[in-house]
Amino acid sequence: MKTRAAVAFAARKPLEIVEIDLDGPKAGEVLVEIRATGICHTDYFTLSGADPEGLFPCVLGHEGAGIVVDVGAGVTSLKKGDHVIPLYTPECRQCKSCLSRKTNLCTAIRATQGKGLMPDGTSRFMCDGEPVLHYMGTSTFSNFIVAPEIALAKIREDAPFDKVCYIGCGVTTGIGAVIWTAKAEVGCRAIVFGLGGIGLNVIQGLRMIGAEQIVGVDINPGRKAIAEKFGMTHFVNPKEVEGDLVPYLVDLTGGGADYTFDATGNVNVMRQALESCHRGWGQSIVIGVAPSGAEISTRPFQLVTGRVWKGTAFGGARGRTDVPRIVDWYMNGKINIDDLITHKLPLERINEGFDLMHAGTSIRSVVEF
């Protein structure tokens, strides 16, 4: 069949809207019509050429929602007409990682997914007779995709695609970092570095669990109002702080935060986040993706005295299990997604979404098919 897609033919080039071929689902796979997809900074990270796993040509996109069109042999958990969110972090429920209950990082299809291929080692996309690679196992910048059954979360049918697509990455990553990675508790003090699409959801997660103090740190003063709407109690612009930022934040939080979250991908900020933690028990959660080859550092004393550095992927969420719950939270008014969707675009204007992101004028742009 044919599908319209925004294809990245090479790094550092605008996406091209073309019609490409898509093979149907094989055993264990599902054909999905994508109705909406968010534009995430991770897509740009790959398009920029900084991603060490970036491969071209490929169909980017990993934050989508749609409807099942067809299923391959052996698929039992999904059927035609089901509403789904593709998962770049699958959940097979059978591999060592899934069975450990210690991580959400399912390894069932990691080897082929990292190569831009389906589990059988081939691509379902073709353009002019040449294969086009998948991206993060999802490729939601295509109107139709084929994905493994274990990489699709079935959701309720009354949830709007243009809102819940954001749960495919940004919402889950931010809220999940609070709930499942940090396991933050009522009454805690926290600092969030970077108030973009991820950081605002971290703030939202902290509000949900009843944090007493939520400090937002960003050099863009335009983010203050919306961060306050989502639960931020204190705003800090590093450019307005005299001297070192770390002691300022330590003093502001009464000895350091119980939890800090980096949503910037800047390794210098990651260090500041760790050192802003409370001595003896503070945890710093790294969410942001740093450029290839970047390293983080701190004095060993910071760790010896009880601070903990932790990383998180997809907020520690188990996709097929937790994503439907988060959709329910949205539909029941427990979380706010509407105010984070600042722009809606047709596929033909998808490159404008990246421009809006870089200009700092959007939180999340959504492409509707």
Image (cartoon, helix red, strand yellow):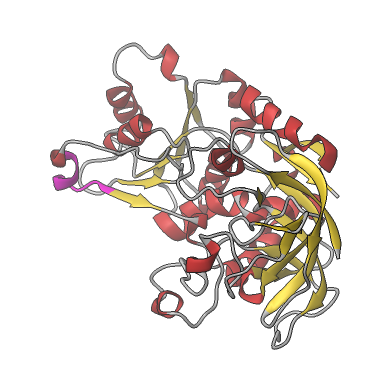
Q: For residue 289, which quarter of the picture?
A: top left
- Taking the magenta stretch, the answer to whether it contains residue 230 is no
Q: Would you place residue 108 above or below residue 225 in this image?
A: below
Instruction: Identify the residue at horizontal 58%, vertical 59% (top origin).
Output: 116
**Looking at the image, which is closer to me, 266 or 182?**
266
Q: Would you place residue 337 above or below residue 132 in this image?
A: above
Q: Can residue 346 be seen from the camera position used here?
A: no
**Looking at the image, which is closer to me, 283 or 314?**
314
Q: Would you place residue 50 above or below residue 124 in this image?
A: above
- Taking the magenta stretch, the answer to whether it contains residue 307 is yes
Residue 290 image offset from top left, x and y in percent: 42, 39
**Looking at the image, which is closer to me, 70 or 82?**
70
Q: Can residue 57 be seen from the camera position used here?
A: yes
From which residue to which does the magenta span run?
A: 302-308
Say left or right for 174 vs 129.
left
Say left or right for 324 vs 105.
right
Instruction: Identify the residue at horizontal 66%, vertical 34% (top origin).
Output: 363
- Give the quarter of the figure containing the N terminus: bottom right
Residue 108 image offset from top left, x and y in percent: 50, 75
Residue 269 image offset from top left, x and y in percent: 37, 31
Instruction: Identify the residue at horizontal 29%, vertical 18% (top origin).
Output: 244
Say left or right for 173 vs 249.
right
**Looking at the image, which is closer to me, 106 or 215?**
106
